Amino acid sequence: MRDGVILRANVFRPDRGGPYPVLVMRTPYGKSSRMDRYVKAGYIVVSQDARGRYDSDGEWESFVRFKTHDAEDGYDTVEWAAKLEGSNGKVGTFGGSYNAFLQWRLAPLRPPSLVAMCAYSIPARYTDLEGPGTIRPGRRLHWWSVSMSPDMRRRAEREGTHARAAAQKEWTSGKSEHWLNFLPYLDLPQEVFEDEIKPVRDWLKNPHTDPWKLHKAVNEITVPNLNIIGWWDHCNGDLMLDRAIRSEGGSKVARNGSRTIVGPWSHAGLGRRRYGNIDFGPQAVFDMTDYQIRWFDYWLKGKQNGIDKTSSYRIFVMGDNAWRDEPDWPLQRAQDKVLYLGSADGANTPAGDGKLAVDLPSQQGTDTYRYDPANPVPSLHGERLFQIPTDQRPLAKRQDILVYQTDPLAERIEVTGNPTVELYAASSAPDTDFIVRLIDVHPDGLARDVSMGVVRARYREGLDQPSLIQPDSVVKYTIRMNPTSNAFLPGHRIRLDITSSDFPNYDRNHNTAANQNADAELKIADQTIYFGSKYPTRIVLPWIKSE
């Protein structure tokens, strides 16, 4: 690197011919030892350990830091790769998640040899990764404990687990329960974050700040990007980066050439069709490697394979279980379909009488539940703790979930975009959470979640404008839900659940006025949801008319 630090890589080459374009993957997870399909497709492939990770020298600077060497290291690596023996001087970068983050860091520096990216599954802002005001413990504590800290420990020659496989075994053998329930987060010991404990704690003191702001630099990016994400991917970032590069990219090629593919997948399951008892059919299967090769064949080799003729967005419409091409996002033809909440005797559990209807209830009413952070609604995402499509029936007896649903539908209703819930609610606490979940209820009872949204009361006006609420006062919350595309078919029901926890997918709100990351006290909150003419709680669905 330009400062003299040596980064090490594996280099894979075709066994004959050339010259070839070069594909570069920079990673903090340990460089790959298998790149066969890319090499056989006619590429030299570089898989490099990021600074301070595994075989590379220097100090690792994690993505919670506001200043790192990531951009410069990426630039220097791309230009080094372009000069490798057998290279034709054209370079593409690829990889998902953190590997994608590193690409978005380097691209604004415009290395001359960079032609195209496939940086997939990463949000524009760190605050989008974490949620409503602090870390999402299920993913983040597992990530630090299993993926990141063992190698830091090894390099520092400290006692403890040095290998990822051993750390995963410790996690599943009991450490997960210990760390996931540890409070407060600011007291988590060095064992969890190792050498990055200071930057992590600095961010936990100010969780409204964003050390990334990847979208702010897209006007400097002049190469196109291919993004492949899932509707349940916690890293889809509301498609902000996709929209940003198309509207503000630094060249016509970047703006017009970038592509986005969104499937019915999670972060760890891109390209698959089934999650437990939920099956999206054979059309959901997607060969990511094959598509990446097609992408780079067009941009780096000039093959006229039709990539330039594909749509800007290719989305999977769940329910129909079919792909559809779209020119933009959000869809300009979407119309608002409003459904109002109401009940007579109470909406607690699916056995209650909570209703979603096009007509506003004539009478003012309320539904109530008690949120106990010591007994939160459990996440249904499995031991890997990635957000995935789930059947909500295991939670059917929870009294702390309000359930509102339509009658069985007489016609297909497609929802594509970001649903929004306008919620009128009061809490006995000065701060609390409200979580909304849109669900497709099948005739056989399957309750498949479609989208969710979260608001932390103190951040209801934005992460940079915290203010507590007055206990027992009615407050209006506007909750923008995650992007989705789902066709609710005839005979199905549209359902909206309201609760206050989803742990450990999201951290528990303590229901106190204290700094939640610095204080361990948990209190029970009594929650009241209002509906009717005075407080018209409703969900606004982005409705696409059937053609």
Image: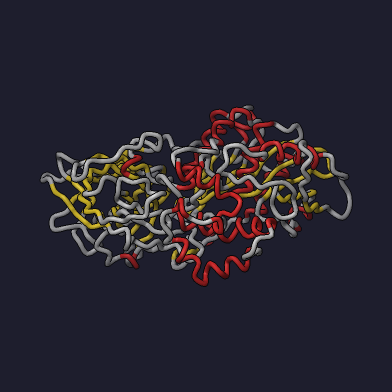
Using the image as rendered, state which of residue 401 and residue 371 is in the foreground.
371
In the displayed structure, would residue 216 be above or below residue 42? above
Question: Looking at the image, which residue is at 30% across and 42% down?
Answer: 337
Q: Position of residue 195 (x, y in %)?
A: 61, 51
Quadrant holding the N terminus: top right
Q: Position of residue 398 (x, y in %)?
A: 27, 64
In the displayed structure, would residue 377 be above or below residue 436? below
| Left or right: 468 in relation to 54 | left
Q: Residue furthest left?
A: 363
Q: Position of residue 456 (x, y in %)?
A: 34, 45
Count of numbered circles in the view: 0
By what rule are the colours in the image chosen? secondary structure
Q: Residue furthest bottom?
A: 173
Question: Looking at the image, which residue is at 50% across and 52% down?
Answer: 233
Regarding residue 294, the answer to whether it shows in the image is no
Using the image as rendered, state which of residue 178 and residue 303 is in the foreground.
178
Question: Looking at the image, which residue is at 51% across and 48% down?
Answer: 235
Regarding residue 505, the answer to whether it shows in the image is yes
Quadrant holding the C terminus: top left
| Left or right: 275 in relation to 524 | right
Q: Position of residue 152 (x, y in %)?
A: 65, 55
Question: Looking at the image, which residue is at 60% across and 58% down?
Answer: 147
Using the image as rendered, state which of residue 109 and residue 172 is in the foreground.
172
| Left or right: 234 in relation to 149 | left
| Left or right: 19 in relation to 180 | right
Q: Quadrant of residue 118 in the image?
A: top right
